[in-house]
Image (cartoon, rainbow, N blue to C red):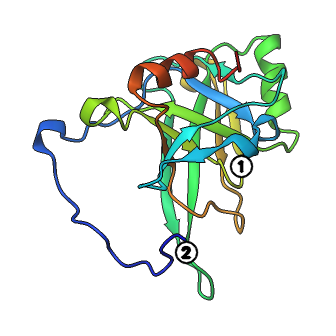
């Protein structure tokens, strides 16, 4: 049974050989939350902040959002609860570079109320790249919270944000995703989580 007391169980250390670095890698995988087979999600036996498997339902796929430099980003923050355990708001900030009809169709789909999960690769990857990938919105899902476009700003790109809905935040900060090692995890990420 997991420890629900909230007591610290280990030291919090600084590994100076792996100093923090900001940013995420350019490409992000967005998944329709309903397409994830939640029965196959597994966590590390010694650290429940690490997911060791994420599988999609048969015939389903994740979708790549192409980025440039640091156009896309992720964030999370604590949400204090008065009479319940505290929760975490996950946020993904994305950019659709070309406002083409095809891309606007997908942007319009985001606005129809479905929930999404974002899988990102951090620039900072940790020791042996074990902390490279994070999953946002896995429990409650992310919803479209803002979307803007202006021909006078941001080179006419479509800017959007997916976030935890108020009152329906995640129970934990984003989970780390590590399927054995970095190479195997990267292969799954690049394959859009499609099952072989």
- Residue at 25%, 35% (x, y): give it: 127
Instruction: Point out the tag, 2 or 1, that comes first from the N-terminus.
Output: 2
* Foreground of the two, 20 or 131: 131
Instruction: Name the side, left or right, on which 164 lies relative to 70.
Output: right
Instruction: Name the side, left or right, on which 113 lies relative to 56.
Output: right
Q: Can residue 193 be seen in this view?
A: yes
Which image quadrant for residue 30?
top right
Q: In which quarter of the image is the N terminus?
A: bottom right
Q: Quadrant of the C terminus?
A: top right
- Residue at 63%, 36% (x, y): give it: 54
Residue furthest bottom as drawn? 83
CA gap, disc 2 and disc 1: 17 Å
Tell me the residue that label 2 is attached to.
Answer: 86
* Foreground of the two, 55 or 33: 55
Instruction: Name the side, left or right, on which 107 lies relative to 18.
Output: right
Residue 97 on image: x %, y %: 61, 17
90 lies above or below 79: above
* Element type at mark 1: loop
Tell me the residue that label 1 is attached to.
Answer: 141
Residue 170 on image: x %, y %: 62, 60
Residue 27 on image: x %, y %: 53, 20
Q: Can residue 149 be seen in this view?
A: no
- Residue at 74%, 45% (x, y): give it: 38
Instruction: Name the side, left or right, on which 76 lies relative to 106.
Output: left
Crowding around mark 2 (Cα neighbors within 10 Å: few <14, some 14 to 19, many 20+) is some
């Amino acid at each position: 049974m997991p420890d629900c007391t909230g007591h610290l169980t280990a030291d919090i250390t600084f590994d100076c050989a792996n100093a923090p670095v900001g940013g995420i890698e350019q490409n992000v995988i967005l998944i329709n939350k309903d397409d994830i087979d939640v029965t196959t999600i597994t966590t590390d036996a010694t650290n429940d902040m690490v997911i060791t498997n994420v599988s999609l339902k048969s015939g389903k796929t994740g979708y790549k959002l192409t980025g440039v430099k640091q156009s896309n980003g992720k964030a999370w923050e604590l949400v204090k609860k008065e009479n319940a355990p505290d929760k975490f708001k996950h946020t993904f900030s994305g950019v659709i570079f070309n406002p083409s009809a095809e891309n606007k169709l997908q942007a319009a789909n985001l606005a129809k109320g479905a929930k999404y999960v974002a899988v990102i690769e951090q620039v900072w990857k940790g020791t042996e790249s074990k902390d490279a990938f994070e999953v946002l919105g896995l429990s409650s899902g992310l919803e479209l919270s803002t979307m803007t476009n202006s021909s006078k700003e941001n080179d006419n790109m479509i800017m959007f944000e997916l976030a935890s809905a108020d009152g329906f935040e995640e129970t934990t900060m984003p989970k780390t995703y590590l399927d054995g090692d970095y190479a195997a995890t990267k292969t799954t990420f690049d394959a859009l989580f499609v099952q072989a």
